[in-house]
Structures are given as C-alpha cells and as structure tokens.
C-alpha cells in the first residue's frame, strides 16, 4: 500500500500557538488577504470543505480548537507569525493526539517519542505552560530540533532528554506523578502523502518489526504507576501498526485499562473487524483531507468500580 496523492493537494493546516497568540490576533494579521469562515460539525465532509475552501478563504476547524485550514498550496513559511512561533504549520491529523490526551494544566506528562516536537509544543500549549512535559527521544539530532522548536514556541514546561524510553524505570520517583503519556513511536509513515519522487512501500517483515517495537513501547508506557491516560498514535495506514497493536496490548492490560471512545463525532473510525476498532479514529486524504493517521486511547479503569465487579 502506498499513499501517492501529491502532498500539496491537501489544505494547509495551521495550529495557533496559544502560548504566543490567539485567534483574534491571527485573524487580524490575515484579515487583508483572507476571509475567515466557521464550519458546523455536521457539515464536515471532504466535498463540503472543498466547496468552502476557495482561494483567499480560511476555515476554522470544527474538531480541534485553534486549528485553521488554508487553501491547498498556501505557503506560510515567510509569514511573520510563523517566523516568531505564533503559528505552527502542522497537519490537522497530527494535532489529534495531544488534543485527545488533553492533560489539564498542572499535570505531569511524558511525550515518549517526542522529536521533532510538534506534539510536545501542542501539549505545552494545552497545559498553558503549567505542569511538566518530559520530552524523550533517543535521536540526539532530532532532539536538537525539538529544543529549537520549544524555544521558538515560548514553551517553558518541557524537559527534553535524549534517551531510549524503553530504558526508563517507571518506578523512578521522578515519574511518580505522571498521569498522561503520549506514545507516537516510529512507524512506516505510510499515511504521509508522498512527494512524487518517493517510493514508500513497506515490506511485511518491516511492518512486523515496527509492530513489535510499537507494542513494547506502548506496554512500557502503561507500566507507569500513576498513569491515567495513554494516547497511542501513528501516521501509518497499516492495521498491523494500528488496530492490531491496540488489540495485542489491550489483551495484556485489560484488567487495568479500557479503550476510550476517541472523539465520538469524528466520522472515520478504526477498522471494525477489531474489537475496539470503532473506539479509535483514523484519518485519510480522501475521507478527511488530512494525512493518513491513527489514534487510540487507553484509560485506567476506575479502581472503585473494579472492586465492585
Ligand atoms: N511526536 C513527534 C512529533 O509530533 O513531532 C514525532 C515522533 S516520530 C513519529 C518517532 C520518534 O521516536 C523519532 O524521533 C525517533 O527518534 C523516536 N524513537 C524511536 N524509538 C525510541 C525509543 N525507544 N525511545 C525514545 N524515542 C524513540
């Protein structure tokens, strides 16, 4: 399976960095050139979006707060708001994981595969810089990019660390209050729209290897003693990296965790050939005008109701 649609056929998504700006300020900055429009949740469909998203129009995303859709092909790299970190150019699909995790301000969070930092900075914005995000990545060069991104975005609550998450000790006292973990591990990337010169078919052996790694990293996240919510995401379209991972891990932790219903209003669900497929969300260029993506959420079972049953 490959994703061969050209990259610039999708809307250009912008996340407003609420640590530095807000919708009113961004609207003002683009006022002379663009007309802003809202969209009701029930009107959301690729056809309707394409009708509304004419040149010089911007749509306020109906699903994720502070996300804007510009017409395909819009280049905002030279925009002052981009240069000073007030807006972040991030596909809508990649804004789902932090939004689903939604740690309340003041929380302790781990972003275990964090670089280059799109979701880390989103988490920091949701926390309003209150609390702490441990941002781990084992790749030093990618972590350097994260550090730059964090600085540019005015983030002060992130602790970047270059390490292998699988080697962290969940019992370490520094993690005793971690309640929220984002698991966005390396994947085949098969959901990302390709440049036409790229060929990204992934062999079954590679998918098996990735799936094994994804299972181990998700299981590790679920070992942290205080963790209440763990969001698992990939930019893959392969069920081996998505629903299958969730099913395998759930079968091992079902006494302690349940699968949460992710964004019930979102139209594209996980594959219903799996027990929890419909609880998860998928995204795709043709059905949701985003890159291909998958998100699942593990929620700790209520200990009181466990004891009763
Ligand atoms: N969450 C990032 C973002 O939104 O910008 C993208 C993460 S990318 C899909 C996966 C990352 O996981 C890579 O940067 C890779 O270096 C990192 N990684 C892979 N295995 C890891 C491990 N065992 N521990 C920590 N990081 C790991």
Image (spheres, rainbow, N blue to C red):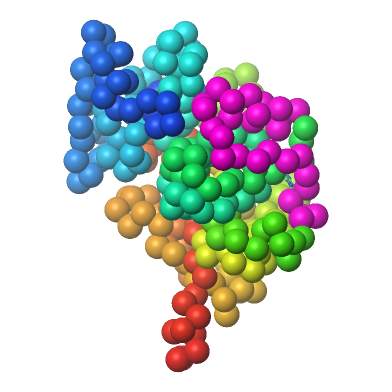
- In the picture as drawn, the residue positioned furthest to the bottom comes out as 308
Between 299 and 18, which is closer to the camera in this rendering? 18
Q: Residue 129, image x and y in percent?
A: 49, 40
Between 253 and 211, which is closer to the camera in this rendering? 253
Residue in the picture at 67% in, 67% down: 223
Q: Is residue 185 magenta?
A: no
Horizontal placement of 31 versus 121: left or right?
A: left
Residue in the picture at 76% in, 55% down: 168
- In the picture as drawn, the residue positioned furthest to the right comes out as 167
In the rendered view of the protein, which quadrant contains the N terminus? Answer: top right
Residue in the picture at 54% in, 32% down: 155
Q: Quadrant of ligand 1?
A: top right
Q: Residue 144, image x and y in percent?
A: 71, 27
Horizontal placement of 269 versus 24: left or right?
A: right
Residue 190 in view in this figure: no
Residue 250 in view in this figure: yes
Instruction: Say above or below: 119 vs 57.
Output: below
Q: Residue 157, image x and y in percent?
A: 56, 40
Instruction: Say above or below: 305 vs 165.
Output: below
What is the count of numbered marks? 0
Q: Quadrant of residue 251?
A: bottom right
Q: Residue 148, image x and y in percent?
A: 63, 24
Residue in the picture at 57% in, 47% down: 132
Q: Quadrant of residue 159?
A: top right
Instruction: Say above or below: 69 vs 262.
Output: above
Q: Which residues are magenta?
A: 141-168
Q: Is residue 142 magenta?
A: yes
């Amino acid at each position: 399976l490959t994703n061969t649609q050209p990259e610039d056929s999708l809307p250009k998504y912008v996340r407003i960095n609420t640590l530095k700006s807000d919708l009113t300020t961004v609207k003002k900055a683009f006022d002379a050139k663009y007309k802003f429009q809202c969209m009701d949740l029930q009107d959301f469909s690729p056809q309707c979006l394409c009708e509304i998203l004419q040149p010089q129009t911007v749509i306020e995303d109906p699903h994720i707060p502070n996300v804007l859709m510009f017409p395909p092909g819009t280049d905002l790299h030279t925009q002052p708001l981009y240069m000073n970190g007030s807006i972040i150019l991030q596909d809508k699909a990649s804004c789902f994981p932090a939004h689903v995790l939604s740690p309340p301000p003041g929380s302790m969070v781990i972003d275990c595969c964090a670089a280059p930092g799109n979701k880390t900075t989103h988490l920091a914005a949701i926390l309003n810089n209150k609390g702490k995000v441990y941002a781990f990545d084992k790749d030093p060069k990618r972590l350097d990019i994260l550090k730059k991104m964090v600085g540019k975005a005015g983030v002060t609550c992130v602790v970047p660390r270059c390490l292998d998450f699988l080697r962290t000790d969940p019992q370490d006292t520094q993690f005793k209050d971690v309640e929220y973990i984002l698991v966005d591990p390396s994947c085949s990337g098969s959901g990302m729209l390709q440049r036409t010169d790229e060929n990204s078919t992934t062999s079954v052996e590679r998918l098996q290897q990735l799936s094994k790694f994804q299972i181990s990293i998700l299981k590790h996240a679920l070992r942290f003693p205080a963790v209440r919510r763990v969001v698992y995401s990939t930019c893959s379209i392969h069920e081996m990296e998505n629903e299958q991972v969730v099913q395998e891990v759930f079968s091992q932790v079902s006494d302690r965790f349940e699968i949460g219903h992710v964004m019930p209003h979102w139209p594209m669900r996980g594959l219903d050939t799996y027990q929890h497929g419909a609880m998860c969300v998928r995204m795709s260029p043709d059905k949701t005008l985003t890159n291909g993506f998958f998100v699942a959420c593990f929620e700790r079972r209520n200990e009181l109701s466990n004891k009763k049953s």
